[in-house]
Amino acid sequence: MPPFMDAPPPTPPLRKPRSLAHALVEEFTARVHDGRLSPGDKLPTEAEIMRTFGVSRTVVREAISKLQAAGLMQTRHGIGTFVNERVDATPFRIGAEQLATLNDVIAVLELRIGIEAEAAALAATRRTEVNLQALRDTLAAFTRAVAEGGDAVAADFQFHLEIARATQNVHFSAMLAALGSSIIPRARLTASSIPDAGSDARPASYLEKVNAEHESIVSAIAARDPEAARTAMRIHLANSRERRRLLSEQQAAR
């Protein structure tokens, strides 16, 4: 979530009401999906939400309206707003047990290509300056993780989540959040098994290629070029799929 969702500053950041409402919808959707809010639970009052998140009454009402339209909440006049009793307690997810083989990973990458290529295109047309800065921050975090010898999984997942948020469509970010960082299958590509590493099989070399692909996506989003963003994301995920396809063939030939 954006920083203000975790610890709202005394003065709310100057962002468009639509972005604030979107962030609020995203926060309450996540709370329903991860069990912090259960079917039948009552939401805080408008005044309490305003105080907690540093937003206006208009923003709160817009967010509640969107949550109602999505079927997550229902308002009982004179009583309050409640989590809908019919909310699915087991939302769509892909757990670690469904990523047991390289073929499983490839199947998830095919799903991600369909979803995230379109998300990148939407992000290019709808992103705010706040969204763009968040994406640039994830690029910097990725670079730091590689320099420190890490696998950069957290920064990688955050990068894709920030693109989903930049669509201003809560369903993209909710789906990415539900999938979780297990969709970044870094551990399956060890230094000695990277199919396209050539003579330099250092993990850092592979991760530098990944981050270069990320930079291409951000450049297209920054330029508000939806076709370039869609293409860059498709190439990025297709490259990841191809690396794992080649590795799967190598393993089968042994």
Image (cartoon, rainbow, N blue to C red):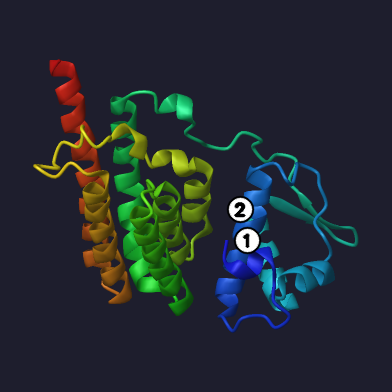
Farthest residue toward the top? 254
Question: From this viewpoint, is residue 71 visible?
Answer: no
Q: Which residue is mark 1?
A: 25
Which dot, 1 or 2, sits closer to the camera?
A: 1
The residue type indicated by label 2 comes to Ala
Callout 1: SS: helix
Q: Residue at x 39, y 48 (%)?
A: 150
Residues at circles 1 and 2 in contact by the CB criterion of under 8 Å: yes
Could you tell me residue 184's position as x and y percent? 38, 42
Q: Which residue is mark 2?
A: 70
Farthest residue toward the right? 78
In the rendered image, the quadrant that contains the N terminus is bottom right
Q: Is residue 88 above or below residue 216?
A: above
Could you tell me residue 16's position as x and y percent? 56, 80
Q: Residue at x 28, y 68 (%)?
A: 226
Q: Residue at x 45, y 69 (%)?
A: 134
Specify whether 127 is left or right of 213: right
